[in-house]
Image (cartoon, rainbow, N blue to C red):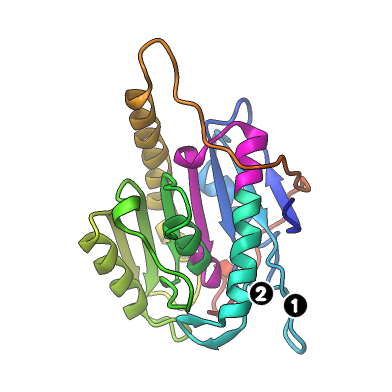
């Protein structure tokens, strides 16, 4: 069972999909929970926001890995968080009956890097989509993206040209790399600093619903006659702490970094 603490925003009825939002550096599981209300105003989805496992001396909040250089996570702490997130995702699939193709992984800053990692990793299943705010595809020893196996994954990338924490070139490189790999990418730049630009959220909400609808149609088309496609699951059932809290630093200038 994953050791990660998480909060949830339940769907209004039977959830049509799963949205997992990974916060940025120095915040916690409450930071992006309110974002679900903007991305999924009709509450069609189950939204889960895990807390990163690391606390660092002299630094507030929680961290997914140690930052030694922007774009290049510390391997030891990265892989530890990667394993814990993989376990959490699998437990959610098992517990809810929703599968990878009904799941969008999203995040801000280092949370976006973890979304890329879990959504494209060679040992991970293809999810419906990746929602990356102000992040990068990580370069780290022992991890690689398998783009041929993840061509069905859609991506929305949003980044500010005025970001002085994670340069916009990281986003441009990610978009080019994914497109070259055959993935469908919606790319957005704005005159924003290191934050989630509120002006990008309506487009992100539309993309989220379209991505899950397209993935659902593909799953239905692939189902055998007289049956239905069974969602992929994980090895064990998990539990997350329910609750809601206002969004934190990710929507404000100068928030969490790489």
Res 250 visible: yes
Check residue 187 for magenta coloring.
no
Q: Position of residue 3 (x, y in %)?
A: 76, 58
Against 168, residue 190 (above or below) is above
Q: Magenta segment range?
A: 90-112
Q: Position of residue 1 (x, y in %)?
A: 74, 50
Residue 96's quadrant in the figure? top right
Can you tell which mark lies on residue 63? 2
Check residue 106 for magenta coloring.
yes
Nearest to the observer: residue 225 or residue 133: 225
Q: Which residue is mark 1?
A: 55
Q: Is residue 42 left or right of residue 136?
A: right
Q: Position of residue 67 (x, y in %)?
A: 57, 85
Residue at (43, 77) in percent of width and height: 139
Q: Is residue 68 left or right of residue 171?
A: right
Q: Is residue 238 left or right of residue 209?
A: right
Residue at (77, 88) in percent of width and height: 57
Identify the secondary structure beneath mark 1: loop
Residue at (64, 37) in percent of width and height: 94
Disc 1 crowd rating (10 Å Cα; few below 14, some 14-19, many 20+) is some
Whether the residues at callouts 1 and 2 have beta carbons within 8 Å, the answer is yes
Residue 128's quadrant in the figure? top left
């Amino acid at each position: 069972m994953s050791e990660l603490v998480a909060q949830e925003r339940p769907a209004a009825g039977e959830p049509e999909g799963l949205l997992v939002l990974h916060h940025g550096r120095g915040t916690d599981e409450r930071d992006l929970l309110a974002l679900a209300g903007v991305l999924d105003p009709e509450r069609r989805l189950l939204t889960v926001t895990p807390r990163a496992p690391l606390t660092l001396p002299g630094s507030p909040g929680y961290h997914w890995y140690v930052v030694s250089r922007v774009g290049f996570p510390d391997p030891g702490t990265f892989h530890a968080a990667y394993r814990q997130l993989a376990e959490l995702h699998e437990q959610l699939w098992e517990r809810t009956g929703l599968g990878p193709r009904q799941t969008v992984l999203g995040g801000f800053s280092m949370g976006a890097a973890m979304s890329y990692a879990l959504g494209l990793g060679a040992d991970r299943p293809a999810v419906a989509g990746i929602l990356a705010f102000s992040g990068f595809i990580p370069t780290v020893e022992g991890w690689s993206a398998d783009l041929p196996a993840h061509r069905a994954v859609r991506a929305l990338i949003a980044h500010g040209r005025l970001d002085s924490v994670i340069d916009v070139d990281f986003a441009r490189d990610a978009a080019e790399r994914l497109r070259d790999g055959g993935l469908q990418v919606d790319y957005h730049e704005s005159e924003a600093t290191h934050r989630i630009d509120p002006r990008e959220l309506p487009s992100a909400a539309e993309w989220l619903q379209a991505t899950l609808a397209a993935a659902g149609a593909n799953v239905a088309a692939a189902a055998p006659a007289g049956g239905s496609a069974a969602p992929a699951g994980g090895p064990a059932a998990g539990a997350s702490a329910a609750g809601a809290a206002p969004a934190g630093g990710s929507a404000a200038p100068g928030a969490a970094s790489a």
